[in-house]
Amino acid sequence: MFIIIILLTLTTLIPRVIPLLLASKINKVPKSVDTFLLAIPYAAIGVLIFPNILTVTQIWWHGALVGIVALCFIIYRVNIFLVLAISVAMIYFLN
Amino acid sequence: MEQFKKALKYVSPIMIAYFPVSMTFGVLSSKQGIDFLSTMSMSLFFYTGAGQFTYLNMISIGATLFTIISTLFLMNLRMLVMSFTISKQMKDLYTGWKKVLLLSILTDEGYVLSSFSKEKMNKTNWSFHFYISLLIYISWAIGTLVGAVIGDFIPPRLGLALNIVIYIMFITMLLPGIQKQYKYIVVTLGAMIINFVLIHLIGLSAGLAMIIAIVVASLLAIPLKITEESEG
């Protein structure tokens, strides 16, 4: 676990601190590189949501249903604790 | 002290908004059997909201350490962009260690608050910008602590239902960005589809499929950006 945490820490610390060394050498990063890097988390989270959300319970549509319901609540800016409580309750009783 | 109060007032909405998030991380992490010290270390050293949830999710689906580390490294590359912008703003205003200190606890939120604050960086207000990031960091740590303690008291059946929480958190993290820039919908859905095709139609291993899907889908954002601008 100790080694894993060190590796994880490096994955954030390197991109956080390296630009300091580059800032004096590079004037401007091409816009396309910027766009690409900023889009990565969206792709990564997308990959993690689907299809894994379908395996929250033994029955695939449980996760899908609760995910969609939660999405609607989040769009309407319902408090996040409330959304979590409703989602967990739904899975609890569906299962 | 003056700078501290100013920073506190400025970041308190973010601190309040992210408290439930870090608390949720603490609960989930302890439910997954990660010990208290490791849970806290993740929030204190690894310290990246989306990444910490991603880590929990990836170990629960049995991803290999290589897949986990490469995915997280890819995700965190966005910090290059933010850190670079802040580095440019700091120019030669501060000594080296002050710059490193500020950048090492930089987050997406801290970046937004610092670079859009009316208080432009100058020789005397390093502490204001440092406190912005520090306060977010402290709030994240306390939330994790509270969550990890609560997590130990949760009964097993409820614990099982908590599996859905991570996906709700993921959706929560995606939405603000997507609502600001619709091209991210293409990236997100594109990644899901590419991942699905690679695994089920081409038969790649889940880890490799994931990494390819992330890179290819993120590249989709580049042409989208250009159309957006030429139309606007």
Image: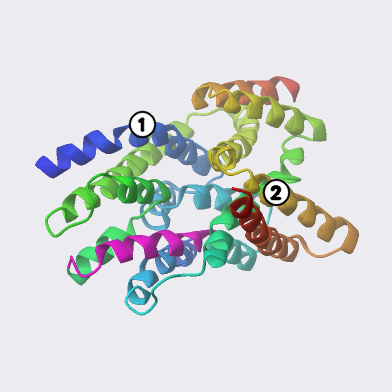
Q: Nearer the viewer, residue A83 or A90?
A: A83
Q: Viewed as shown, does residue B92 lie left or right of B186?
A: left
**Helix, strand or loop for disc 2:** helix
Residue positioned 81% across, 53% down in the render: B196
In reply to whether residue B24 is colored magenta, the answer given is: no
Please determine whether, in this image, residue A78 is positioned above or below residue B199: above
User: What's the amino acid at mark 1?
Assistant: Ile
Q: Which residue is mark 2?
A: B186
Check the picture and name the quadrant holding the N terminus of chain B.
top left
In reply to whether residue B81 is colored magenta, the answer given is: yes
Residue A37 pos. (x, y %) = 55, 62
Q: Alpha-carbon distance for marks 1 and 2?
A: 31 Å
Residue B157 pos. (x, y %) = 64, 28
Which tag, 1 or 2, sits closer to the chain's start?
1
Q: Which residue is mark 1?
A: B16
User: What's the amino acid at mark 2?
Assistant: Val
Q: Viewed as shown, does residue A14 lie left or right of B184?
A: left
Instruction: Name the quadrant containing residue B17.
Output: top left
Q: Do marks 1 and 2 share a chain?
A: yes
Q: Which residues are magenta?
A: B75-94
